[in-house]
Image: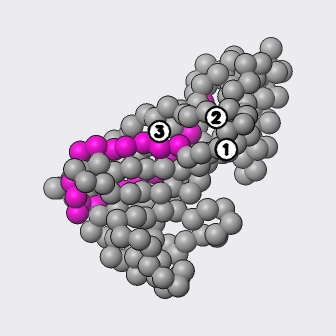
Amino acid sequence: REAVVGSALSAVARSAGDGQQLSTPEELLVRQAAGGTVRLTWFYDERVLEQLADPSHPLRHLDFEVRQQSEAANCRLRSRVHVCECRTFSEAEEVGEQSFDVEGCTPGKVYVFSVRARAQFDGVEEPVYSAYSEAIRLGDADVAVAQVHEAAAGGPPPPSEARSPGPSEGAAPAASAAPAP
C-alpha cells in the first residue's frame, strides 16, 4: 500500500515538472465586481484532475487555498486564507477554470491574491501543498500594473482586470506582481 502511495506521489511530482509535490495553479485572473466582490479564476493541471476523478488513484481530495492579503492601518500585513473546493470535469467536458468569489473587499483598497493546491492522499496523514501561484495585486496599484502591462504587451489590460501570465507567455515584469511571503 505504501509503495502505491509513494508511486502516486512520484507521478504527481513528475506532472508538476519542478520537483514539487503538486502543480502550482496557473493563469490567475482577478476581476473586481460591484459590491465589493472579487472573482478569482485559474487553471489547474488536467492530469491531477483526472487522477482525482479516478477512484483507484490514491488522490482522495483536492481543494485550493486562496490567500488574500492587505495592509492594515498600522502598516502590518493582514492575510486571510479561504478554502475553495476543486471542480472536476467529465471526460467529454473541456477542462474549465477553477473559481472563487471573495466578498467584502473595499473598492480601491489594495489586495494581493494568490492560490495554492492542497491534496489528501490515501496513506498520507498530512495534506500535500503546491507552491502559491504568482501573486496578483488589485486596487489603487492597478494604474502602475496597467502601465507595466501596456509597456510589456503592447496595450493595456481591460480595466478592473489583472492576471498572471500563462506558461507560454513567460514571466511578467517584477513590478506587476507582489512577492508572495
Residue toward you, 76 or 54: 54
Secondary structure of residue under mark 3: strand
Look at 74% across and 40% down and name the residue there: 47
Residue toward you, 106 or 17: 106
Across and down, in percent, residue 105 comes to: 25, 50
Which of the two labelled residues, at mark 3 and mark 2, occupies the earlier sequence position? Answer: 3
Could you say which disc has been placed on residue 65 in the image?
A: 3
> How many dots with numbers?
3
What residue range appears in magenta?
98-119
In the rendered structure, are the residues bearing label 3 and label 2 in contact, judged by CB atoms less than 8 Å apart? no
Nearer to us of marks 3 and 2 is 2
In the rendered structure, are the residues bearing label 2 and label 1 in contact, judged by CB atoms less than 8 Å apart? yes
Look at 51% across and 37% down and name the residue there: 64
Q: Quadrant of the N terminus?
A: top right
- Residue at the farthest left position: 73
Secondary structure of residue under mark 1: loop
Across and down, in percent, residue 56 comes to: 77, 18
Dot 3 crowding, Cα within 10 Å, few <14, some 14–19, many 20+: many
Which of the two labelled residues, at mark 2 and mark 1, occupies the earlier sequence position? Answer: 2
Nearer to us of marks 3 and 1 is 1
- In the picture of the structure, the residue carrying the numbered disc 2 is 89
Relative to 153, say whether 140 is above or below.
above
- In the picture of the structure, the residue carrying the numbered disc 1 is 94
Specify the amino acid type for callout 3. Answer: Glu
Label 2 – label 1 distance at C-alpha: 7 Å
Which of the two labelled residues, at mark 3 and mark 1, occupies the earlier sequence position? Answer: 3
Relative to 136, say whether 14 is above or below.
above
Specify the amino acid type for callout 1. Answer: Glu
Q: Is residue 102 left or right of residue 107?
A: right
